[in-house]
Image (cartoon, rainbow, N blue to C red):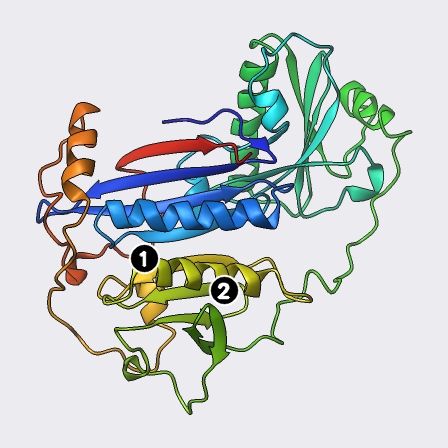
Amino acid sequence: MHIHQIRSPTSALSNRTIALKSGALRHDIHYWLGKDTSQDEAGTAASKTVELDAALGGRAVQYREVQGHETGKFLSYFKPCIIPQEGGVSSGFKHVEAEEHKTRLYVCKGKHVVHVKEVPFARSLFNHDDIFILDTKSKIFQFNGSNSSIQERAKALEVVQYIKDTYHDGKCEVAAIEDGKLMADAETGEFWGFFGGFAPLPRKTASDKDKTIDSIYTRLFCVNKGKAEPMEADSLTKELLDTNKCYLLDCGLEIFVWMGRNTSLDERKSASAAAEELVCGLNRPKSHIIRVIEGFETVMFRSKFDAWPQSGDVAVSEDGRGKVAALLKRQGVNVKGLLKAAPAKEEPQPYIDCTGNLQVYLKYFM
């Protein structure tokens, strides 16, 4: 399934289901937050994600995706990319009318999955490392930074083709501009004409934003009455996690929410809200929030601990699965194995996998 536009400020839920060798189904739930989404809307999206997980049997891995900082896993579902558009509640229910084409500038990053971001129309943003796409009314220019790789250029070309087919009905010219190679090329001169003429690009200097965040160390919090309380421990071990509680594992660029099997839906929602509050704190990077249920932890989560014992199959709640199975069956999905618990030993490795069924729920929070 493909999403051509995701309007901000909105939130969207997507659910990907994969059939394992045992016949059981494994779920990944992502909720996407537009850049203008309010904190209340983000909290509501997180709460609805927990409810969806409960309906699916309480074993899904849940990912918080923020516009411009999406995970590679999420971006891999959309071919070739996501290009968010301005909009929201008011524009979401209006008929889209044809309008004059607006010249736009995009930056593309990534070799395997592509992060595409619209940036201000300014020459000062160009550098030797990235690839830029200039979308004009009659021609699309792809500017290849001298330090960009062949794979990055190939992926950016897929984005160029997508823009051509989507916004120009396939009827416009495409030109490739090579960084530093002027050589009286007419198309290169035309490209730089949009920015006041050609001039050598300065060498990029490392800024604070480019440096790896090393000031935030791995910290474990226990969620008690909706509050994240730091835990003191010489080392991280599985024994620190109580099946009757929820925990936050803050790893700087990632925050994991671990939910014990015996915790209630309200306790899981409170833990999600505590994670949202933590990620919105001052002077911290744009963090991903990943929620896992006891017994179905991801390889990445387990790797954060000094020791993680091998465990057997975990019994999972059957509450709500019958209704979900009936719903999926009406949609033509093979529901064989829905009532089976997925053994932890069959969990795939954390590589990008584009197989499975994808469902996207677009939600406008009034």
Tell me the amino acid under the disc marked 2.
Ala
Instruction: Determine the CA span between mark 2 and mark 1.
Output: 14 Å
Give the foreground label among 2 and 1.
Answer: 1
Q: Residue at x 32, y 34 (%)?
A: 358
Mark 1 lies on a secondary structure that is helix
Judging depth in this view, the residue of 84 and 199 nearest the camera is 84
Tell me the amino acid under the disc marked 1.
Leu
Residue assigned mark 1: 265
Q: Which image quadrant for residue 169? A: top right
The numbered disc on residue 154 is none
Mark 2 lies on a secondary structure that is helix
- Could you tell which of marks 2 and 1 lies nearer the N-terminus? 1
Badge 2 crowding class, 10 Å Cα cut-off, few under 14, some 14 to 19, many 20 or more, is many
The numbered disc on residue 274 is 2
Q: Position of residue 179 (x, y in %)?
A: 73, 38
- Taking the image as drawn, is residue 20 in sight? yes
Judging depth in this view, the residue of 144 and 139 nearest the camera is 139
Q: Position of residue 3 (x, y in %)?
A: 45, 27
